[in-house]
Image (cartoon, rainbow, N blue to C red):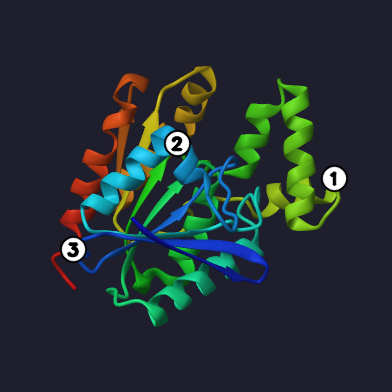
Amino acid sequence: MEIRNFQLDTEWNVIHYPERPQGFGILIIGDERHFVDSNTSFWLQNEGKSILLHSLLDAGYTVFYSNLYGKNWGSQKAVRLSKRVYQHIIRSEILNEKIHILAEGMGALVALKLIHDMKDCIRSVVLLNPILSLDHQLELEKDRKFFYKKMVRELSQSFNQDGEQMIKMIREVDAPWNEKTSVPMKIIHVLSDGRAYKQSQLLNQLSAKWENEKAPVSLCYMVPEKRMQMSVPIQEFYKRHENLL
């Protein structure tokens, strides 16, 4: 597997080249454990993510991603860097300009903003156990004081505001999925623990909204035992949206 690491705005980024490229690219936007440095990345070191990455490469996809300032929680600077990474890849590689996105956890917050800002450049999106609302996520963490304080601290750093101002700002502007989307999207939610079940409540509420709007959004629940087979529905979904170049 050929890999190229490069830096943009002090952040490390990586592109993985398949042996038999088929011309389509996938931008990965990771969750809180995600990282990229000059030599390796979370998607190479984590067994489950490595299996998924290699299955996408075996299918001919060119895969790329960025460190995105670590735990960015969907900050605007992470969105801006994602756009720069996309532009760099499209300029330097032979790829179709309309890419797929694969986002996990907090990475969904960046993906949602990219859909709004550059929907003509996005072919389809898959979200894995997505965080769709910071306000909702804060409410989920309130019963776990250590994790709640940790999240508030990380949000304050990402958005450059103190805790109280940041929480007020989130509650005023945090309104996921208010705008209709024309970008095909698949949400895969692994029901691995009690918190995952609580997160699924928001998904159930939003699914009714998507159905009323006839939005191109599908929702799939998965048991943990099937996690390693996740690449199959992801690739099937991507393939369905590659007919129009």
Label ID, residue 129:
2
Q: Residue at x 69, y 47 (%)?
A: 171
Q: Residue at x 47, y 22 (%)?
A: 197
Number of residues whose C-alpha sits closer than 10 Å to that of mark 2, classed few (under 14), some (14–19) or many (20 or more) = many
Camera-near label (1 vs 2) is 2
Label ID, residue 89:
none
Using the image as rendered, state which of residue 156 and residue 169 is in the foreground: 156
Camera-near label (3 vs 1) is 3
Number of residues whose C-alpha sits closer than 10 Å to that of mark 1, classed few (under 14), some (14–19) or many (20 or more) = few
Give the SS element for disc 3: loop
Cα separation between marks 1 and 2? 27 Å
Q: Residue at x 34, y 38 (%)?
A: 51
Q: Dividing the picture into quarters, in which one does residue 39 lie?
A: bottom right
Identify residue for label 1: 164
Can you name the residue that lies furthest to the bottom here? Answer: 91
The quarter in which the C terminus is drawn is bottom left
Instruction: Work out whether 228 lies above or below 170.
Output: above
Callouts 3 and 1 close, C-beta under 8 Å = no
The quarter in which the N terminus is drawn is bottom left
Cα separation between marks 2 and 3? 24 Å
Q: Position of residue 124 (x, y in %)?
A: 30, 58
Number of marks in picture: 3
Pointer 3 or 1: first along the chain? 1
Pointer 1 or 2: first along the chain? 2
Q: Visible in this render: residue 50?
A: yes
Q: Is residue 12 left or right of residue 240?
A: right
Identify residue for label 3: 242
Give the SS element for disc 1: helix
Give the SS element for disc 2: loop
